[in-house]
Amino acid sequence: MKQVTREELLAMVDRAADCATAVSDAAVDVIAYACLVAVMAQGPGAHKESEQVIADAARENGHPAEVVSSAGALVRTLRAHGYSRVAIVTPYMAPLTRMVREYIEGEGIEVLDAIALEVPDNLEVGRLDPSGLPGIARGLKREGAEAIVLSACVQMPSLAAVQAVEDELGLPVVTAATATAYEVLTSLGHAPAISGAGRLLAPA
C-alpha cells in the first residue's frame, strides 16, 4: 500500500488470509492485524469478520492462534474501560477520517471531535513526528470527553507523546497501537506493566 485510499486498503485486506497462513507457520500464540483503517474501510463491525478470517486461516494451516485486530482492539478497549465519549486524531484524509469516526460511533462510542492530519502517503504517515501531537491534542474539542484517541492508526508514531498528553490534559490517552499491545499482552496472559506509555499499559 502506497496511498492511504479505500481502494488500496481493500486490496490489502484481500491478502489477510494468505498473510495469516504465512505467519502461523511460526506456531505463534497471537496474530495481530495491525491496520485499523483497512478493517474499518470494510464497513460497520468488520473487525469481527476480519479476525475470524485470520483465525480460520491459521487453524486450517494447523497452527490455531488468538487474533487481535487494531480496529477491534481500539473499540473493545474503549468500551471495556467505560470510555463512551472520545476525541480522536488521525493521519488520514478527511473522508477516511469520517469513516473511522462513523465506525467508532457504530460501536456505541461518541466521537466529540476528530482532527484529520490529511497525509495521503503511507510512508509519510510513518515519518510523522510524535512531538507535534501534544499541540494537536490541545486543539481537540474535549468538553465531555472521557478519553483521547491520540492516534487512530498503528502506522502513525505516537507512543512518545502518550504520557505527556495524559499528564497535560488529565484524560486517559489510548492509541490504536497501545490498544493492540494491551490485547496482545492480555491474550498471552500477561498484565501490562509498561511505564511512561499511558495508564492503559501502566503497571497496576
Image (tube, grey):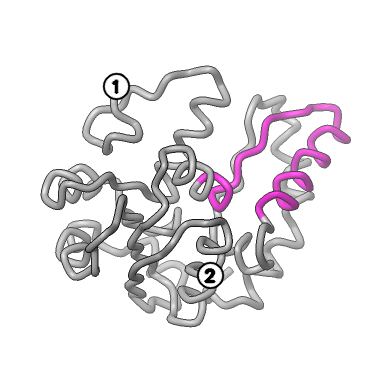
- Which residue is nearer to you in this view: 52 or 54? 52
Q: Is residue 166 above or below residue 98?
A: above
The verdict on residue 130 being magenta is no
Which quarter of the figure is the C terminus placed in?
top left
- State how far apart marks 1 and 2 are (Cα): 33 Å
Q: Is residue 93 above or below residue 191?
A: below
Q: Which mark is residue 33?
A: none
The verdict on residue 54 being magenta is yes
Q: Residues within 10 Å of mark 2 (few under 14, many from 20)?
A: some
Residue type of the residue flagged with mark 2: Glu
- Left or right, 80 with respect to 169, comes to right
Considering the numbered disc 2 on the image, is that residue within a helix, a strand or a loop?
Answer: helix
Residue type of the residue flagged with mark 1: Pro
Report the label total.
2
Residue at screen point 76% across, 44% down: 52
- Left or right, 126 with respect to 32, comes to left
The location of residue 20, given as percent across then percent down, is: 73, 43
Q: Residues within 10 Å of mark 1 (few under 14, many from 20)?
A: few
Mark 2, residue position: 102
The location of residue 16, given as percent across then percent down, is: 72, 53
Residue at screen point 71% across, 29% down: 65
Residue at screen point 56% across, 53% down: 71
What span is colored magenta in the figure? 47-73
Q: Which one is in front in this view, the residue at disc 1 or the one at disc 2?
A: 2
The part of the image, by quadrant, that contains residue 200 is top left
- Left or right, 20 with respect to 186, comes to right
Residue reaching furthest to the front:
144
Q: Is residue 79 above or below residue 16?
A: above
Mark 1, residue position: 203
- Left or right, 59 with respect to 163, comes to right
The location of residue 112, given as percent across then percent down, is: 35, 67
Residue at screen point 71% across, 69% down: 11
